[in-house]
Amino acid sequence: MKVLVINSGSSSIKYQLIDMADESVMVSGLVERIGEEMGSLTSKTFPGTDKEVKTVLEQPIPTHGVGLEMSIDLICKGDNAVCTMNEIDVVGHRVVAGGEKFNVPVVITEDMWPDLTETERLAPLHNPANLGGARDATKLFPGVPQVLVFDTAFHQTMPPHAYMYALPYEYYEQDHVRRYGAHGTSHKYVAKECARLTGKPAEEMNLITIHMGNGASMSAVKNGLCVDTSMGLTPLEGLVMGTRSGDIDPAIHNYLAVNRGMDIAAIDNVLNKESGLKGLCGMNDMRDIHAAIEEGNERARLALEVQTYRTRKYIGSYMAVLGRVDAIVFTAGIGENDDIVRLKSLEGLEPFGMKIDPEINAVRSKQARKISAADSTVDIWVIPTNEELAIAREAKALVS
């Protein structure tokens, strides 16, 4: 079985074609700057092998549909084609928010579209593009199952006391205001990988999974099920992120409106795009922040301290939620590659059995690895996430 995985963003499309016989990536690609004066498509055939062929096209790409069609032409019709369109058995799509109605992956049927469109208000920056990619793929692959995998699905096992806000109950009943979380596909993948790597059944493990990239979230996983997560109704709540504030006093909205004359749209834009690490020090790339700290930049140092302190507080709260923690798992761009952030995020937690081996932690690798000290009672892992493979597995399981 061959699964084409599509992640359609606001101005981009990421894709992989995966042969599920051995879960190898046949093609990976990225379409960028859709709708701008000049777009680009970068495609790699047999990525990561000595036979890798890279193709780069630069031309105007007016719509996502055009970008997807260009990608399919390279996969199935170009000089380096790896299969025909008829050999693609299923197309899997990442969708950020599924709400309460879509709490498991689904094969799209025509009657689902009104409910799917309703989810766009839960993630207005992501869901319209995600679902648009599914519509485009449906036209390109008539009759081929289109599977939607929702980032919120893994968090649907949270109990009501974890997902409810202390707001008038009618806001939940009528407007579905509650905590949904995000990055669920990644959290679920690394949780299962941690169980596999330790040789224990997933349903017997208690984990704290930390997805830390430009966006960041954390989940408490008890006996294989998510019981809490840091993001909320939107991906703004929780940890300090690249440009997002994470948790703040909600009265700050009114304070800014009164004292700065800002409307709600301007405040929302600041909290999502101008805050977090960027707001504190003007930079949201952790590599730049580390370089600035080396040069004595105190605001960069403050940004690092604020971020890792918030992460440490969430770890402590999830220890209370879980009672017993078998392992902590770091993943995503910063979580997988930044030893300083990992070290500082666990700083001071040694009395609770969480001890990193500094030498092992400092080693850069693309492989999953345990970085805890020999006398740590809690395993600490770095496990690279693979959301595309996770989506492909879900799609295969559903149509099989």
Image (spheres, rainbow, N blue to C red):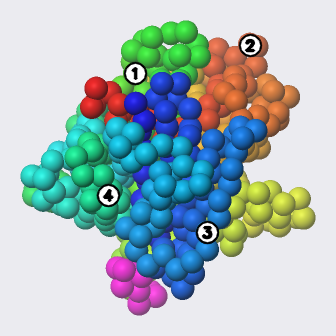
Q: Alpha carbon of mark 1 to alpha carbon of mark 2: how far?
A: 25 Å
The amino acid marked with disc number 1 is: Gly
Q: Separation of disc 3 and disc 1 at Cα? A: 43 Å
Residue 261 lies within the magenta run = yes
* Tag 3: amino acid: Leu
Q: Real-space Cα distance between discs 3 and 4?
A: 21 Å
Decide which of tag 3 and tag 4 comes sooner along the chain: 3
Whether residue 374 is visible: yes
Amino acid under disc 2? Asp
Pointer 3 and pointer 2: residues touching (CB < 8 Å)? no
Q: Position of residue 221 (x, y in %)?
A: 42, 27
Q: Quadrant of residue 391?
A: top left
What is the number of the mark on residue 140? 4
SS of the residue at dot 1? loop
Q: Earlier in the sequence, mark 2 or mark 4?
A: 4
**Pointer 3: what residue?**
57
Is the residue 374 above or below the residue 64 in the image? above
Answer with left or right where residue 176 lies relative to residue 84: left
Q: Are marks 3 and 4 in contact (CB under 8 Å)?
A: no
Magenta range is 259-267
- Residue wearing tag 2: 375
Answer with left or right where residue 141 lies relative to residue 22: left
Image x and y of residue 354, in percent:
66, 24
Mark found first going from the N terminus, 3 or 1: 3
